[in-house]
Image: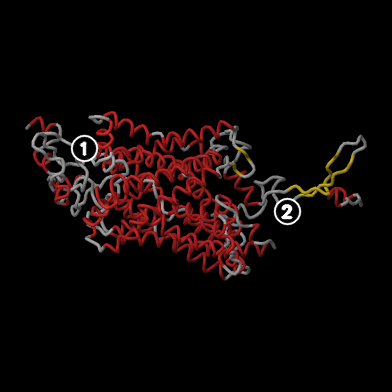
Amino acid sequence: MRKMRKYGFNISDLVFKNPAVSDEEKNADPHIGSGDENADRGNWNSKKEYLLSMIGYAVGLGNVWRFPYLTYKHGGGAFLIPYVIMLSVAGLPLFFMESSLGQFCSQGPINVWKAVPIFQGVGITMMLVSTFVSIYYNVIIAYSIYYLFASFQEPLPWSDCSNWSDMNCNITAREYCNMTAYNGSLMAVNTSMIADGNQSCLEEFLASVPLQSPSERYWDVVALQRTSSMDETGPVVWHLALCLLLGWILIAAALFKGIKSSGKVVYFTATFPYAVLLILLIRGVTLEGARNGIEYYIGSQSNLTKLSEAEVWKDAATQIFFSLSIAWGGLTALASYNKFHNNCYKDSIIVCITNCSTSIFAGFAIFSILGHMAHVYGKPVSEVAQAGFGLAFIAYPDALSKLPISPLWSILFFFMLITLGLDSQFAGIEVITTCLQDAYPKVLKAKRGLITVLICIVLFLLGLPCVTGAGIYWVNLIDTFCAGWILLVAGLLEVFGLSCIYGGNRFIKDIEMMIGTKHALFWIWWRACWFFITPVVLLVILGWSLYTFTAPTYGSVEYPQWGIALGWCMTVFCLVWIPIVAVWKLVKASGNPWQRLKSVCSPTKDWGPYLECHRNERYGQAGMNDANVYVISNKNSTRL
């Protein structure tokens, strides 16, 4: 008995999944509350904190810059038709599946695959993708922090070509005249020099050299200090490195006590962006030219003929897939801290509808102000709307600089980007810490805060290449190869593993253990999606994405071959664990090949609800037989 206690065992540990913990021990662990149902892992303090955390995770930077641009690109309001359809057939079914799975067994994205052990590598892939994305995602937060500090100036530094700029900074193109020199060679002469000499240049000899606007030049020269290519690394950009450090400090502080502290932070970070978007929308619609911007976004110029193009449906599906953060592991990790009988179905509906509504709402705020900028420049909206970083750090800052009291609007906008990014980053780090805690529950239970700090330090160091002169190329490379179709592979295997191998009907019974028995009609749609519609949609999107894949570029800058090769190496590193773990499980299993395969495709003996009180007759006697008695525990399978 003394030896058992020495190594952390006692009788209640062996018999029950929820060992008795004294009030004193509970209070000693900051991650466990006195009212928590799960005294080992802890629970959310309230349903509100969970919902805000899920909304904050799902609603990210992509809602502000990627969705509005895709809507504008693909026919305006017409894009909402495939967008809503893809939400129904792919987004919501997978969101419901992931959050239900995590809540049912109270485990992170790796341990949930005790349901189908041969697919446990899928959980490792999710964790690795979250790790890679966390590295570069915080760099984007660092960009926003830098711009926030730079916004405390009047006028905004990117409003014109001031002392930081060079001859390539201008809002108009520079014109040259190709004149033939006396030796027959071509010589480019500035048209202003010709005008000074009372000469003229024939139209066929005029050449226009495009220049960069002040905001674009500020982004490249001042903020990024961007080098000419990925081959030229350049020094560390120290103002970005310090902003990156500040970003990681904020994340470590918010997550130091796990969900007990992050659950409090999201009351602000998850709600503040909506207040800013509302303020920007009210300000934007009162500006001259705002109507033109909104019509370009979702108005009279909607093009329904775009619905016949396959790319529109592919972009709608990928936007839903990535916007809801499906297959990243975060949904499973956050849901694992719910109480067992939480209504995960209702939560999924609320979060998905809120996420998509936010995307549409953000588009109005963004394009109303872009419409005003188009009016100021005398250009069509199509020439001022840009995708990705161009919209967030070039086009929109340029538009804000044209408004009265421009520093105020700029401060609000970039503070909103920071809060949007932090919410998503919280869940990304939570995936890593949850996986580690599930793997070593006894060792890490009281050291979670320290583990969180160490993870933030390591990821900060790994992110330093992203804040060099070539940093933007690294950010774009990781985004292309780690946050792309890898997620489609993971999502496809996830829905296939649970619906076909584990059993969709068995999974439905598991869900009904949590939310109560539902009528058969209730499950018709979910069965149709999980068994057929969703896998087919994901398979088509994956095939189309691979077929249309092109090497990434940053603007006109192409990546070197070694950079492309490195990107594929990151992809392979994330995916290779799926076959490795599958083979390893098969090798460890006993029996003939068929018995081994059947064994690794069946739930483990300790699969099921985490707490003994929630394991009914379906799981209460699992793994028990006369010869060998296995104690039901999600921490260890102990043979008596």
Query: Picture coordinates of residue 178 (x, y %)?
Result: 85, 44
Query: Residue at label 1?
Result: 442
Q: CA distance from mark 2 to mark 1?
A: 64 Å
Q: Disc 2, disc 1: CB below 8 Å?
A: no
Find numbered disc 1 in the image and state the secondary structure of the residue it sits on.
helix
Lateral position of residue 70 relative to residue 182, left or right: left
- Return the residue found at the far left: 1
Can you tell which of label 2 and label 1 is closer to the viewer? 1
Q: Residue at x 67, y 50 (%)?
A: 162
Q: Which mark is residue 172?
A: 2
Above or below: residue 140 compared with residue 474: below
Q: Residues within 10 Å of mark 1 (few under 14, many from 20)?
A: some
Q: How many marks?
A: 2
Give 399 or 60, whichever is nearer the viewer.
60
Above or below: residue 443 compared with residue 100: above
Give the residue type that dot 2 points to: Thr
Query: Picture coordinates of residue 286 (x, y %)?
Result: 57, 71
Query: Picture coordinates of residue 220 (x, y %)?
Result: 61, 44
Q: Quadrant of residue 58?
A: bottom left
